[in-house]
């Protein structure tokens, strides 16, 4: 009698492909991008590829899985139950990858490497630029990559390592250190002939410069409203550096941080620093980066250097 033998499993590549879908990270990334954007065009912009590429890759993933991941409609692409499950898994994978990147970034032993830093144009011009130069001389192994923006970058997603930002209420998910207080006052060009110490109410007939909505300075907007100055605005702009430029061009009066204007001989401080408009300057970072040597080197350097200028940054009172 012929002896039977157990059938051995087929280990050929073709058989392996039949038993698993071979989804790669970029497949999960694709599904997450479409689910987040709700359209192929939005996903193509997020991924930096063409609309046709997104369409082709989605069809390929659905074919390999044998399921429909998105319902197509006039309002866009809405994930099916299977699509939602893949998108949720992709979010978990993305967060795990970002956490791993942050943890690895914290293993340096020497103050070297890059620090992605974000700050505002006014802080860079009026405070940080010379300090960054001094820091570079002290730590030549560290490269500062600075993104200038009035928007707070997402530090959790490593859009930046640290943020040097004005704030009275920093985000709770970040850690950091308050550096100093920043004072603000009313300033004008000397050619307007206005007298320092004039009550704000008496300046309501003058032309004023206001903050545009993208500047996100609600405290100044509220202060101007309380003093009936909003209707006196003849010009609005969305950066402090642009407001300073408007003052220099004799456009009108404006509230700006004292550090921006006190060194300009053509600009006159008209009021004392306004207490309700004082705000804090913060050094912020993600909690996972607290052990990174190069970041602590920058934080300690800026803490000492900025606090040494705290009186200038708080603004001077009129004599």
Image: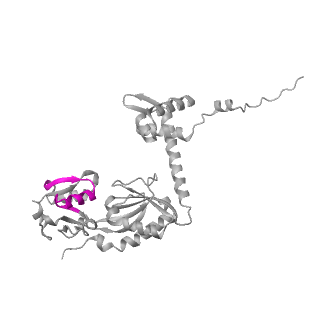
Can the viewer see residue 80 in this picture?
no
Q: Position of residue 66 (x, y in %)?
A: 55, 28
Using the image as rendered, state which of residue 199 and residue 88 is in the foreground.
199
Can the viewer see residue 40 in this picture?
yes
Q: Can residue 283 be found in the magenta stretch?
A: no
Residue drawn at (46%, 53%) of the image: 158
Question: As displayed, is residue 165 above or below residue 214?
Answer: below
Using the image as rendered, state which of residue 253 and residue 27 is in the foreground.
253
Residue 298 location, quadrant: bottom left
Q: Position of residue 243 (x, y in %)?
A: 23, 58
Residue 135 location, quadrant: bottom left
Q: Can residue 237 be found in the magenta stretch?
A: yes
Q: Image quadrant for the C terminus?
A: bottom left
- Which range of residues does the magenta coloring cover? 231-255
Furthest-top residue in view?
A: 1
User: Could you tell me how many numbered marks the image carries?
Assistant: 0
Q: Position of residue 57 (x, y in %)?
A: 51, 33
Q: Is residue 143 left or right of residue 206?
A: right
Q: Image quadrant for the N terminus?
A: top right
Question: As displayed, is residue 167 above or below residue 76?
Answer: below
Q: Is residue 217 left or right of residue 160?
A: left
Residue drawn at (36%, 72%) of the image: 307
Furthest-bottom residue in view?
A: 319
Q: How is the image coloured?
A: one colour
Using the image as rendered, state which of residue 12 and residue 146 is in the foreground.
146
Q: Position of residue 123 (x, y in %)?
A: 33, 62
């Amino acid at each position: 009698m012929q002896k039977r033998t157990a059938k051995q499993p087929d280990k050929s590549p073709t058989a392996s492909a039949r038993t698993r879908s071979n989804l790669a990270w970029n497949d999960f990334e694709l599904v997450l991008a479409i689910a987040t954007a709700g359209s192929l065009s939005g996903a193509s912009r997020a991924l930096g590829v063409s609309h046709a590429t997104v369409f082709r890759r989605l069809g390929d993933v659905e074919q390999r899985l044998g399921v429909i991941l998105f319902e197509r409609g006039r309002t866009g692409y809405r994930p099916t139950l299977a699509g939602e499950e893949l998108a949720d898994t992709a979010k978990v994978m993305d967060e795990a990858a970002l956490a791993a990147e942050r943890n690895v970034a914290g293993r340096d032993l020497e103050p070297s490497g890059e620090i992605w830093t974000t700050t505002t144009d006014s802080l860079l011009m009026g405070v940080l630029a010379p300090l960054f130069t001094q820091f570079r001389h002290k730590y030549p192994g560290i490269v500062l990559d600075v993104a200038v923006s009035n928007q707070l970058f997402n530090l959790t997603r490593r859009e930046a390592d640290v943020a040097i930002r004005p704030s009275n209420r920093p985000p709770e998910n970040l850690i950091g250190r308050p550096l100093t207080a920043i004072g603000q006052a009313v300033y004008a060009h000397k050619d307007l002939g206005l007298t320092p110490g004039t009550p704000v109410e008496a300046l309501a007939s003058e032309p004023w410069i206001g903050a545009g909505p993208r500047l996100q300075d609600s405290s100044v907007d509220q202060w101007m409203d309380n003093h009936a100055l909003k209707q006196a605005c003849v010009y609005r702009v969305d950066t402090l550096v642009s407001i300073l430029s408007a003052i220099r061009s004799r456009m009108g009066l404006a509230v700006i941080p004292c550090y921006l204007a006190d060194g300009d001989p053509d600009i006159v401080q008209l009021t004392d620093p306004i207490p309700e408009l004082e705000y804090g300057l913060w050094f912020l970072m993600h909690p996972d980066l607290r052990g990174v040597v190069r970041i602590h080197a920058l934080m300690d350097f800026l803490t000492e250097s900025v606090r040494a200028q705290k009186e200038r940054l708080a603004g001077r009172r009129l004599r």
